[in-house]
Image (tube, rainbow, N blue to C red):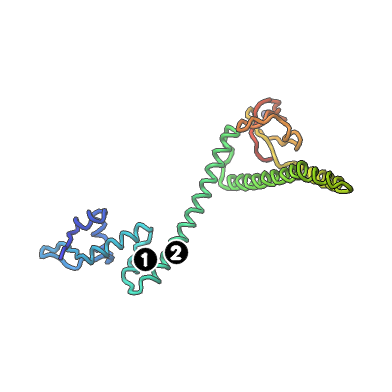
Amino acid sequence: MKTYSTGELAKACKVSVRTVQYYDKEGIVVPSQLSVGGRRIYSEDDFKKFHCVCLYKSLGFSLEDIKKIMETEDTYDLLLEVIMKQQEKISDEIHTLEKTKEKLNMVKEEIDNTGTLRLESLDEMEALLDKKRKHRKTDIMTYIFMGCYVLILFVGFPITVSVGGIYPFVMLIIAITLLLGLIFYHSGVNAYICPSCHEKFPIGFFKDMFTLNGGSKGKYLKCSHCGHRGWMKESFPE
Ligand SMILES: [Zn+2]
């Protein structure tokens, strides 16, 4: 029957000799024999067991859990339990990493937009992140409002005009209400950052809608603080 030395087992399983020795010391995979000189001799069963341990390790299981799985007769229930625990741990880690990524993006965006970083504490960063999230939500709401408006203008109106009677007037009232709602909702939501004095200034709905838009450059505006004219990036009010 084929047997394996520590080195052979390590090579076959692509781990270090120290790992094989460590698993023996921790009682996870103990060699079934020792040579006269005290060297570890692993049987075919030990070899399979070791492969199993490597598989569980690659799934991120802790050594403590692996040991429990290897010692338990009814492996599947315990295995499922460990898998679920591991899935939960990974979900938490992904969530934490995504939050960190969001913070990094926000700090980068802040430097890109203002040419400086005025954040001095974690609290300030959290507050800014909060404002940014809210701003994103209001942006989505504005697009929904505008989408409804376009629908009324190009679909609702022609239909109600063809039907006649009171319907075109009802549609007109809906359109006006929607426009007023949009103006009201939009006021105080957007601000622009001046690249010259790095200050933020809010602008009204119509100015925001009808100002020259340079895409990623921002909008061509005049700063209400220093009077500088140029491309200004969108932000949210302080
Ligand atoms: Zn300015």
- Residue occupying the point 41% across, 66% down: 82
| Image: 13 above or below 210 | below
- Quadrant housing residue 154: top right
Label 1 belongs to which residue?
65
Q: Horizontal and vertical percent for residue 114?
A: 60, 33
In-image side of 23 versus 116 (left or right): left
Q: Horizontal and vertical percent for residue 228?
A: 68, 25
| Cβ atoms at labels 2 and 1 below 8 Å apart | yes
- Residue occupying the point 51% across, 49% down: 98
Q: Residue furthest left?
A: 36
Label 2 belongs to which residue?
85
Q: Which of 184 and 147 is in front in this view?
A: 147
| Label 1 environment density (alpha carbons within 10 Å; few <14, some 14–19, many ≥20) | some
- Kindly identify the amino acid type of the residue bearing the numbered disc 2: Lys
Q: Horizontal and vertical percent for residue 18?
A: 24, 55
Name the quadrant of the N terminus. bottom left
- Quadrant housing residue 37: bottom left
